[in-house]
């Protein structure tokens, strides 16, 4: 195998594929990228045995077809060298010669026969079409709320569903929760077929964001019994799904509150972060005294005390005091602020969740610390 390609082209592709390869594994081939050169294009694949990604880039300078397994991290370090414009790769037996502007590297090569093969013989249960931008927004809007540790339910995932309606047509819904916070995204689709329900692993969601972020136009999502695949014009990512069931989250979302707060996202985030300066590892809590004039307070034994004043754009209802982890507020405000510069908070009392609403597509929910601690002890 021998070809020459623009450094920016292979570097960008390699960076995406490297998000899949594991840093540690008992299978050395999984730490590599499979490179296959055919006339006119270079096909590259990576996997961690749970996610399989394939990306194709055009290449007009292929002298010899072939395939090779190249270490993902080592090759990326070469491709990221500053100032290089072209990369020439030539495989000779068990070695690969990589030539770049001002440098040459001899890299050990693994046999391509050892690369894991993607296999899923199950039939497609459902599929739908969405824009890459739409899917990226959906995943980014909820991924932060997913659990990072095992719990009662399979919440280390993003729950993906497509619901059909005679009037509204197909609707995409993604939701994630760790029991302390929740995020829900809903958007209309142009086309769907069959049954689309899947528990997408958190890592897979992150990988898909990387691929979707550099893509424009439509992509197709195919759901099988144990896998989900997203297919774009130049790439395909297949992931194994989380088994089990997602918690019945609908009942947790309050229908209405006793107070509604309309506020500027940036101003409120600044107030929260200012008050949170005095948090420590033992007391990650800010107390909010919501009202026409809102007070944020934080006190810890080691750091001291803070008191910050904030005036919302509008406050409708009785004053409510509630204690929340400030990081959860900041995370929710990041999403709310991307949708609109203002957001609305719905409050019931100091023991019930805070509900964020921005636009018509996104909803966020945060459980007060008193309730979260009770749930943790249980």
Image (tube, helix red, strand yellow):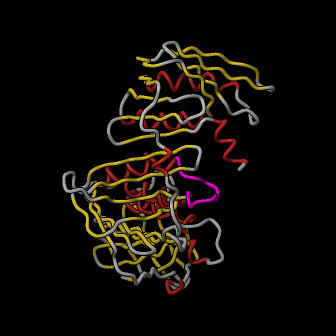
User: Which of the 4 image quarters holds residue 336?
Assistant: top left
Q: Who's the residue at 37% across and 53% down the image?
A: 173
Would residue 154 be counted in the magenta stretch? yes
Horizontally, residue 325 falls left or right of residue 247, namely right
Q: Who's the residue at 58% across and 53% down the image?
A: 147
Would residue 101 be seen by someone viewing this image from the given angle? Answer: no
Q: Who's the residue at 33% across and 67% down the image?
A: 231
In the picture shown, does residue 147 fall above or below 193?
A: above
Q: Quadrant of the N terminus?
A: bottom left
Where residue 52 sits: x, y (%)? 46, 72
Where residue 206 sits: x, y (%)? 48, 56
In the picture shown, does residue 333 fall above or below 321?
A: below
Would residue 88 be seen by someone viewing this image from the given angle? Answer: yes
Where residue 364 sits: x, y (%)? 46, 40
Region in magenta: 145-155
Among all residues in the image, which is located at the extreme right? Answer: 301
Among all residues in the image, which is located at the extreme left? Answer: 167
Horizontally, residue 27 falls left or right of residue 174, namely right
Q: Main secondary structure of the magenta part?
A: loop
Query: In front here: 188 or 233?
Result: 188
Q: Who's the residue at 42% across and 52% down the image?
A: 139
Would residue 141 be counted in the magenta stretch? no
Query: In front here: 231 or 70?
Result: 231
């Amino acid at each position: 195998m021998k070809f020459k390609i623009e450094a920016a082209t292979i570097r960008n592709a390699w960076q995406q594929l490297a998000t899949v390869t594991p840093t540690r594994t008992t299978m050395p081939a999984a730490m590599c990228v499979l490179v296959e050169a055919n006339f006119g294009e270079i096909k590259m694949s990576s996997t961690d045995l749970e996610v399989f990604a394939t990306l194709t880039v055009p290449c007009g300078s292929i002298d010899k077809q072939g395939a090779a397994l190249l270490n993902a991290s080592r090759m990326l370090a070469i491709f990221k060298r500053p100032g290089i414009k072209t990369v020439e790769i030539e495989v000779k037996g068990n070695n690969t010669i990589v030539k770049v502007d001002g440098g040459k590297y001899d890299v050990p090569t693994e046999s391509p026969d050892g690369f894991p093969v993607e296999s899923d013989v199950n039939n497609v249960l459902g599929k739908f079409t969405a824009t890459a931008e739409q899917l990226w927004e959906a995943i980014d809007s909820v991924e932060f709320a997913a659990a990072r540790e095992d719990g009662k339910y399979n919440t280390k995932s993003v729950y993906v569903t497509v619901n059909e309606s005679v009037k509204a047509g197909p609707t995409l819904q993604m939701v994630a929760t760790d029991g302390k916070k929740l995020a829900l995204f809903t958007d209309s689709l142009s086309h769907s077929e069959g049954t689309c329900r899947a528990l997408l692993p958190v890592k897979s969601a992150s990988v898909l964001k990387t691929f979707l972020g550099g893509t424009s136009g439509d992509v197709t999502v195919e759901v099988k019994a144990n896998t989900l695949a997203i297919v774009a014009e130049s790439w395909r990512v297949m992931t194994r799904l989380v088994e089990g069931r997602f918690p019945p989250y609908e009942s947790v979302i309050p229908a209405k509150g006793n107070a509604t707060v309309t506020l500027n996202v940036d101003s409120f985030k600044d107030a929260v972060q200012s008050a949170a300066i005095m948090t420590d590892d033992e007391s990650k809590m800010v107390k909010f005294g919501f009202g026409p004039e809102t007070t944020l307070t934080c006190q810890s034994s080691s750091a001291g005390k803070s008191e910050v004043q904030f005036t919302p754009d509008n406050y409708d209802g009785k004053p409510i005091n509630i204690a929340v982890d400030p990081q959860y507020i900041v995370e929710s405000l990041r999403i709310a602020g991307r949708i609109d510069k203002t957001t609305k908070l719905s409050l019931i009392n100091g023991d019930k969740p805070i509900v964020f609403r921005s636009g018509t597509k996104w909803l966020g929910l945060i459980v007060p610390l008193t309730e979260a601690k009770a749930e943790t002890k249980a």
